[in-house]
Image: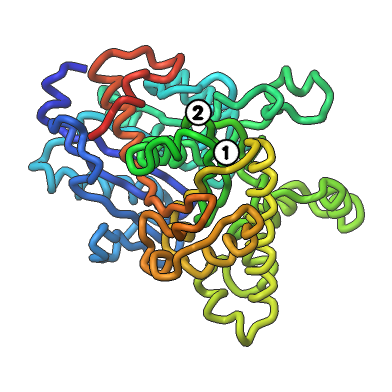
Amino acid sequence: MPGSALASGTILVLNCGSSSIKFALFDSGATPLPRRPLWAGRVEGIGGTRADLIDADGASVALALDPERPYHAALQHVRACIERRTGGRPPAAVVHRVVHGGSKYTAPVRLDRVVLEELRSFIPLAPLHQPYALEAIEVLLGEMPHLPQVACFDTAFHRTLPQVEQMLPLPHALWERGVRRYGFHGLSYEYLAIALAERHGPAARGRTIVAHLGSGASLCAMEGLSSVATTMGFSALDGLMMGTRCGAVDPGVLLHLLQVDKLGVQELEHLLYRESGLLGVSGLSPSPQVLLAAEDTNPRARMALDLYVRRIVREIGALTAVLGGLDLLAFTAGVGEHSAVLRERICRGLHWLGMELEEGANRTHAATISSARSRVRVAVEPTNEEWVAAFHAFEMLREGVSPIGGRNPRFTKARP
């Protein structure tokens, strides 16, 4: 891409899910690339009875979407809004958060139809996200074939996992076919590796665990700011209990549901991805905030939260053993950044590590919430997946970095 296109333009980041599209627009003419977008928002309710475009300030506009092609129509609205804000100019590039890159794609890649077809083979590994990102890519390839598009993968940050962490105790032939532990939430963890190092210095470069707690949830153990272990594995179902996803579960339960309850594969998939987790146990909501408000009068809400916290505490303990100790625990994403109550309950369960919170700092979501007496520093750090994706695309397109290969070494040095 000519440098002038980036210098006078914008980079659009799209994060597409089954019923929503999150977007952020970054000024590619500024140096260094700003971490705060020019504009951001989301379209919610795609495919439902009502869809809304909501910007970062909370302003909401109802959208009329073509019922035959609601996702395509939602993308058109996003593009139209952006062009109105940029004086009719389309973005210089579009970058997509793609959840699964398999064993091949471990760095950002320039998208074309060949790559798109390869990415389709990973849909069964991330059915909640992969199909919708690929749909957006296909729409833009068809309508704007000369617009550069880049994919950034949630699995890529975990390519540093040692082989023993990637392996599953299954026949070796399955390993050779790509059945292994990949890890997810990589864009979030990559941003935290930068932000924690900036804020906490040597403590972050030691033995660190990041808790990405949102509607999806996972933990990542880092040494030297690189991933060495994580709770999600072959798919985004593994590990912690989540809003509607089960997390790790005895595979014998799945055999029981198939053999005894006679569930079909699609029924089982729906149960595990959409009817389990906090929603399934509570019968009320996938939202921890809703359950916290109800727990005093609803025993199932309290039970769901107890199990949620227990699973997090247990997995932090396991990752601490892998690291041989713990210097820093950092909370991020929607629940991690905003729920002081759940942070306190998790850290209370880790008191044996010498972890102690400062109540006022935790209540106000301060950057450091541990007390001076705590042997482990505890942090709250907002994530910024969109900027990570925009930065990767910006560097790749500006410098002509090879789209497949190792990590761009300049990225770790960036300090915008």
Residue 50 coordinates in the image, percent (x, y): 38, 66
* Element assignment for label 2: helix
The furthest residue to the bottom: 297
Residue 396 coordinates in the image, percent (x, y): 31, 20
Q: Quadrant of residue 180?
A: top right
| Residue 45 higher or lower than 1, as above or below | below
Residue 75 coordinates in the image, percent (x, y): 32, 46
- Mark nearest the camera among 1 and 2 is 1
On-image quarter of the C terminus: top left
- Which disc number belongs to residue 221? 1
> What type is the residue that disc 1 sits on?
Ala
Q: Earlier in the sequence, mark 1 or mark 2?
A: 2
* Element assignment for label 1: strand
Q: Quadrant of residue 57?
A: bottom left
Q: Residue at x 54, y 51 (%)?
A: 375
Q: Residue at x 36, y 26 (%)?
A: 412
Q: Residue at x 44, y 57 (%)?
A: 372
Label 2 belongs to which residue?
A: 156
Q: How many neighbours does mark 1 have within 10 angstroms: few (below 14), some (14-19), or many (20 or more)? A: many
